[in-house]
Structures are given as C-alpha cells and as structure tokens.
C-alpha cells in the first residue's frame, strides 16, 4: 500500500522496519558486498604492486594517493547504487541489480565532490589549534629541550604542560563540538543527492535545513544509527580475536567480520534512506 505524508515513525521503528525490508529483499546486500570485495582486491593489488615493482622506483606517495582516489570512487559508486536500490524498494516495492549500475554511473562523481567538500569543511577545526601553536611558539621549550627532558628528567616538562593545559582543553572541546555539528548538519547529503537528484551544494543546504527544522528527530536518529554502527563494528573486530583465541583459522574470523560489515552497510543505507523519505513526506509502497 502507499504511505504518504501522514506516516511517521520513531527511530527504533525505522531500524526494525529496515531490517525486515533487508530480509525480504536480500538483493540490497549486493552494493555493500561489491564495495567491500572491491576494496579488498584494490588493497591487495596495491600491496602487490609496491612489493613486486620496486625496480620501477614507484613513488610511495603516488601509490597511496592513487589508492585513496580509487577507494573514494569505489565507495561513492557503491553508496550511490545502494541508496538508489533502497529508494527503489521503498518507493516502488522492488529493485534489480541493474539499479546499482544506473545509480552508480549517474551519481558517483557528485558523491566524490560532496566528500571532498565536506572534508574541506572539516579541516576548519585546525583553526582551533592555532592558539596552542602560538603558545608553543612563544615558549622557551624547543624540540631539543623536550627531547633532552624526556631522556633525563621528564618532570622538567611540567611547566610546559601546565601552560598548555587550558589552550589544549579548549581546542579539543571546540574541535569535538565542531566536528559533531558538521556531522549532524550534513549527514543526509549523499542521500539527498541520489534520492532528490539535487546538486552538491543544494544538497548541503537541504541537509542543514532538515537539522534546523527537525533537530530532535534528526539527532536522535543519527545518534541511534551511530551507536549501532559502533557496536557492530566493535563486535566484528572482537569476533576475530575470539576465533583466534580458540584456534579457528584467521580466514574464518575475517570472513565473519566481512559478512557483519556487509550486513551493517546495507542496513544503514536502508535505515537512512527510509528515514529521509519519511521525514520529507515522500510516498512509499511497502509491504507491511
């Protein structure tokens, strides 16, 4: 049936409904699986390249930058496809693997631009550390003094720590507050680009508007999803350690870890896509 603007649901209901949707449409796992497998192969390829072609005097920085760039494009392609497929399921009740390619081709470049822009915005936090750097520059404790104190008497550094304690504390708190605010303000940018087919900068404005008009609802949802993400990620790492402790082959633990991460990635895209569609009053066609 079709569900319109009158439909609302809390964050917990969105999570549960999203999991049910993933169970009914396991095809939604494909983008996350493609993403993680592609990243693994890319990492292995780069390691092989560096280890076996040293005689070409490959610049390690160039290899690193190439890896980062390729990872960014792979992640953006998978995100576009995943959000597009989730959108199709939620709005029409069905999706196909071809939507991964169609949405990926259409929106990958926009998502890359969005990521670069948000990275640029986040770097503003470095301004909060300028007073700390200025204070360090005005002090008589240079690098040689610090190294000498560490090798002889570390207590000689106490005056430096006392002088920097307040500036560093302020910088840490300001940085944390700023990065948290930016995360909430622009959380939906990728989803807005794909779902609403908007430009990067219009998507930033709309994401900020959502936070401004529905702060409690947006913050509570983002907080819940973030907590679930942290718990599942921690559990996946812990499972590897547990498996190793009981003598299981490392590959088994790694496989379980990969499966959990794929499930998490697919579920998160469904949750956020569903939440955004409901929040903006779009119609849904979903079996209840």
Image (cartoon, rainbow, N blue to C red):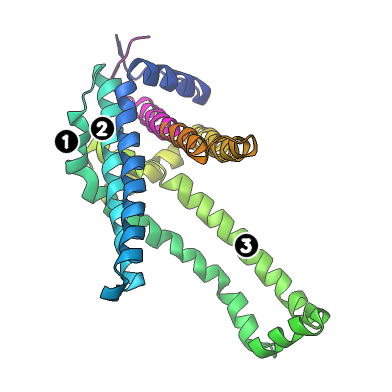
First-in-chain label (3 vs 2): 2
* Along the viewing direction, whichever of 213 and 279 lies nearer the viewer: 279
In the rendering, at what x and y percent does residue 139 appear?
A: 68, 87
Q: Residue at x 20, y 30 (%)?
A: 99
Magenta region includes residue 277: yes
| Distance (Cα) linking label 3 and label 1 | 43 Å
**Quadrant location of residue 105?**
top left
Q: In this rendering, would 12 be left or right of 111? A: right
The answer to whether the residue labelled 3 contacts the one labelled 1, judged by CB atoms less than 8 Å apart, is no
**Which label lies toward us, 3 or 2?**
2
Ranked by sequence position, the earlier of labels 2 and 1 is 2
Label 3 or label 1, whichever comes before in sequence order: 1
Q: Secondary structure at mark 3?
A: helix
Rendered location of residue 192, percent (x, y): 30, 39
Residues at discs 3 and 2 in contact (Cβ within 8 Å): no
Residue 22 is situated, as x and y percent measured from the top left of the image, at 38, 21
* Residue tagged 2: 84
Q: Quick one: SS at disc 2?
A: helix
Label 2: few (<14), some (14–19) or many (≥20) C-alpha neighbours in 10 Å: many
Secondary structure beneath label 1: helix
**Magenta extent:** 263-288
**What secondary structure predominates along the stretch shown in magenta?**
helix
Res 29 quadrant in image: top left
Res 74 seen here: yes
Could you tell me which residue is drawn at 38 percent across and 28 percent down?
270
Q: CA distance from mark 3 to mark 2?
A: 38 Å
Location of the N terminus by quadrant is top left
Q: Which residue is mark 1?
A: 102
Q: Which residue is mark 3?
A: 172
Closer-to-camera residue (191/24): 24
Q: Is residue 199 above or below residue 81?
A: below
Decide: is 103 above or below 145. above
């Amino acid at each position: 049936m079709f569900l319109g603007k009158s439909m609302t649901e809390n964050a917990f209901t969105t999570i549960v409904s999203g999991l049910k949707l993933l169970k009914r449409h396991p095809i939604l796992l494909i983008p996350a699986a493609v993403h993680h497998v592609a990243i693994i192969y890319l990492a292995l390829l780069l390691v092989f390249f560096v280890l076996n072609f040293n005689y070409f005097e490959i610049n390690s920085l160039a290899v690193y930058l190439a890896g980062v760039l390729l990872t960014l494009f792979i992640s953006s392609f998978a995100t576009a496809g995943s959000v597009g497929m989730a959108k199709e399921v939620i709005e029409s009740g069905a999706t196909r693997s071809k939507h991964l390619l169609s949405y990926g081709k259409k929106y990958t470049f926009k998502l890359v631009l969005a990521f670069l822009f948000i990275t640029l915005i986040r770097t503003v936090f470095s301004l909060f550390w300028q007073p700390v750097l200025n204070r360090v520059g005005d002090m008589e404790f240079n690098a040689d003094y610090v190294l000498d104190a560490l090798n002889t008497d570390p207590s000689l550094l106490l005056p430096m720590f006392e002088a920097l304690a307040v500036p560093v504390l302020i910088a840490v708190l300001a940085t944390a507050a700023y990065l948290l605010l930016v995360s909430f303000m622009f959380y939906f940018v990728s989803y807005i680009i794909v779902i609403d087919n908007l430009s990067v900068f219009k998507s930033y404005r709309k994401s900020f508007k959502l936070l401004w008009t529905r702060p409690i609802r947006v913050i509570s949802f983002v907080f819940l999803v973030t907590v679930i993400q942290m718990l599942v990620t921690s559990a996946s790492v812990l499972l590897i350690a547990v498996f190793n402790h009981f003598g299981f082959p490392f590959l088994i633990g790694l496989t379980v870890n990969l499966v959990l991460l794929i499930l998490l990635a697919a579920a998160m895209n469904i949750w956020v896509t569903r939440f955004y569609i409901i929040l903006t009053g779009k119609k849904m066609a979903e079996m209840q």
